[in-house]
Amino acid sequence: MTAKRKHRGIGLLMSSFLTLAGCSVTPPPAIPSGAELQSLDTIARHLLVRHQIIDNRPGDHCDPERGPACFIAEITLSSSVDIAPGDWAIYFSHIAPVQKVTAGDFAIEHINGDLHRLVPAPALAGLTAGTPHTVRYIADLWHLSRSDLMPNYYVAAGRDARVIASTATGIDPATGLETKPHAGTFDDSDRHLRRTPGDLTQPATAQTLFDSNRHAAAISEEVATAIIPTPTSMSRSPGGGRLDLSPGVALQLNGLPRGAVAAAVTALADLGIGENTAGVPLIMTLDPALNIALDGEAGAEPGAYRLQLDSKQITVQTGDQAGAANALRSLAALLMPAGKQVPLLQIEDSPRYNFRGLHLDVARNFHSKALVLTLLEQMAVFKLNKLHLHLGDDEGWRLQIDGLAELTDIGSRRCHDLEENRCLLPQLGSGPNANAGVNGYYTADDYIEILRYATARHIQVLPSLDMPGHARAAVKAMEARYRKYLAQGDRSNAERYLLSDPADATRYESYQFYNDNTLNVCMESTYRFIEKVIDEVALLHRRAGQPLTRYHIGADETAGAWLDSPVCEAFINAGHPGVAAMEDLGGYFIERVAAMLAAKGIEAAGWSDGMGHTDPAGMPAVVQSNAWGALFGDGHKSAHEQVNRGWQVIVSTPDVTYFDMPYEADAFEPGYYWASRGTNTRKVFSFMPDNLPVHAEFWHGHNGQPLVLKDTIERDKNNTISYRPMAAGKRFAGLQGHLWSETVRSDADVEYRLFPRLVALAERAWHRADWEVPYDYSGRDYSAQTRFFTATARRQRDRDWARFASIMALKVLPKLDAAGIRYRIPTAGARLVDNHLHTNVIFPGLAVEYRIDGGAWTVWTAPVAVATAAAIEVRVRSADGRRRGRSWALD
């Protein structure tokens, strides 16, 4: 399932024909001399690297044994000083395997994962100042974005290494965004921005955004009484009126402990509404027997509340503590920025889903505890209540486990150590230094603090340490532990938590091109390790006061693993129930770990592809499955099949919920793009999570081509039903947004990717819009030619979007600014009409600036006359006017 968090373009799109072989790697030379170290410093300072994609279009130059897709690229090396030959090599991350070098004085060797190295040819007599050396090569698949070109190339001799300065990331002073000076241009739509001649993707431009923003007219008159997420029911008091909260609020709690609302009360104070015994009475009552009847139905999901604002007081009624906090969050949402008056009204509110989640990957690249705490507070603001914290993967293990120090001593760091005795191999452009910002882990105390902070905000933390695939950090850490104790003569302790079979001769390659990233599921030491980890994580949860009641296994598998493992061969021959062949091992592992969890009172969760390999009869009564199948790959079918199993299926559709995908189809917009070339806030807002196949009517696939999604009964050649729609009365259990961090190297970038898209996801997780098309349990087929999403409903959606976008611009974004959230400032739409510049923006109300022929930036207020040949650039300002978004030119 890796592809869900990386370039599924490599996995989902190519696995049917991509066959790769491992490459041998020359061992590093001995410790370098002083002269060689000086040479490394010279190379690091003076070598100029330029990485240019030449052509992504496939052709006869592609190796047919590797599949039909490949691209041509060049790495050019030049220097302002002479560089002497020596036993040095240049290491770099390249996320697609190199097929061959076609020109140049360097070989390219694959080490493991995405780590490669450029090795000078023996005949190369160094680099002469001013003379460029270009290495042209062919690699699998495609590179359509600057995000594909990883930073921090480094030069190394032996164990000594230096980052090549010209490949280090920088920060754009105008926007605060990451820059990569070595990344070449992407200025040819056909060669650089499309996979094949049949790729219909329309690259984003100022003109295309202008057209798509045409529905975003400002509706400012509704903003004062609106909140996000939209409540189930809101009614204004007759005659209107407003309540002045300048004196603060006098909190009265009936049946509620203060801790249940303390965080929300603090949030109100941060907006200028503090506590004051002489303030407006705020009377909050918790009655567990209370039924808030909404839409004619008795009862409500946990977190429901009733909020009444009249001329003299505020009253809150709720059936649980989360509902009380949600009511205060809604009160805060009614405030205009810097305002202290709220309209007189009544809200009755209940969430659409009880599971409203955010998945945060801190394993690929580490992110700080401070960031996690910041995100938890913003999750509470928008009533999200589940944090799926991805703590372990191939590239890192991020949680301290008592008694297994190697997991963090080694597994939390990547550095230049090819033997991996001190750290993991560099990956994802992390560079050679163990102290790089992408390395790190949470101590036990850090994690407990995160849990307590979440609990105070009624957010459940669901930890995940991925297994059996995507587990390389754990595998390598335990191998280092094995070597340590074996050297001490303690074989028993060495083997106690070993996760790999030393005699395993299997040659496999994961979607990220690792050949050693999978736990051996046939070894008892693997299950001993898992139980140790689960017990330690559960202990941390108990200490924090948030019991571990659900754990996300991951359930990732790696095709081809264990085939030549003597341990697995013996395991299968031993006749274990349900295991007759190698292909049964994955399901066996998940069922066994799920049973282990159930015995400890912990519910099992996992990703839908791995969970789908299990026998439902062998699984516990309660199972969570994250349905992450892409719609262009018929992902709705596996989601429906697992709902029909009786599982709690969380909608994790990557086409719209994966926020590591770019906002727009633009090579300068960061992110992988295997599931979506563009996922902007409006797309997230338009999502109908209850009805996945309906999106074929108005969305396109990853190549810009129309979708056809069939959701009717299907039969195989034996006339046996092979697929049936979701059974009547069944429904999804929740909705989750996701951020995988392969291309995310800073906390600021996390905020850029998540906001403002996460706000739209919170809207859909909490509120079902009237314009959404209900799911048809009898089955339908959907395409651009069907019209179940009627013209009337589309107009309702567009009107609702205009309302939502106005609230974002005038209420939500200013508050995000005040909270220090570095959200993405949108790129501007612009078009010349009769030689006059017109502009717009996805969030009407944000200021657009323009400049002509490199002149001063000016705020656009009305159409501006411009000369035909003028060079025009546009950009958008943040809501508080302090930051600027990325500028671009009109074509």
Image (cartoon, rainbow, N blue to C red):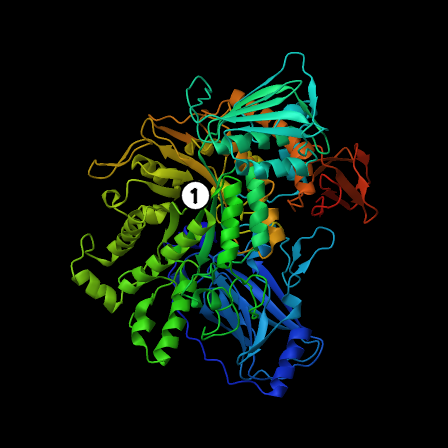
The answer to whether 624 is drawn above or below residue 411 in the figure is above
Q: Tell me the residue at 32%/26% (across/down).
A: 728
Image quadrant holding the C terminus, namely top right
Name the residue that disc number 1 marks: 630
Q: Quadrant of residue 392?
A: bottom left
Is residue 522 left or right of 222 when viewed as pictured? left
Nearest the viewer among 131 and 365 is 365
| Along the viewing direction, whichever of 786 and 658 lies nearer the viewer | 658
> Badge 1: few (under 14), some or many (20 or more) residues near its Cα, within 10 Å?
many
Residue 547 percent coordinates (x, y): 41, 46
- Residue located 50% across and 54% down the image: 447
Residue located farthest toward the front when viewing the structure as drawn? 277
Question: Relative to 761, is 345 on the left or the right?
Answer: right
| Residue 581 as seen in the image, left or right of residue 700 | left
* 795 in relation to 158, above or below: above
Residue at 40% from the left image edge and 54% from the top image edge: 539
Q: Quadrant of residue 247?
A: top right
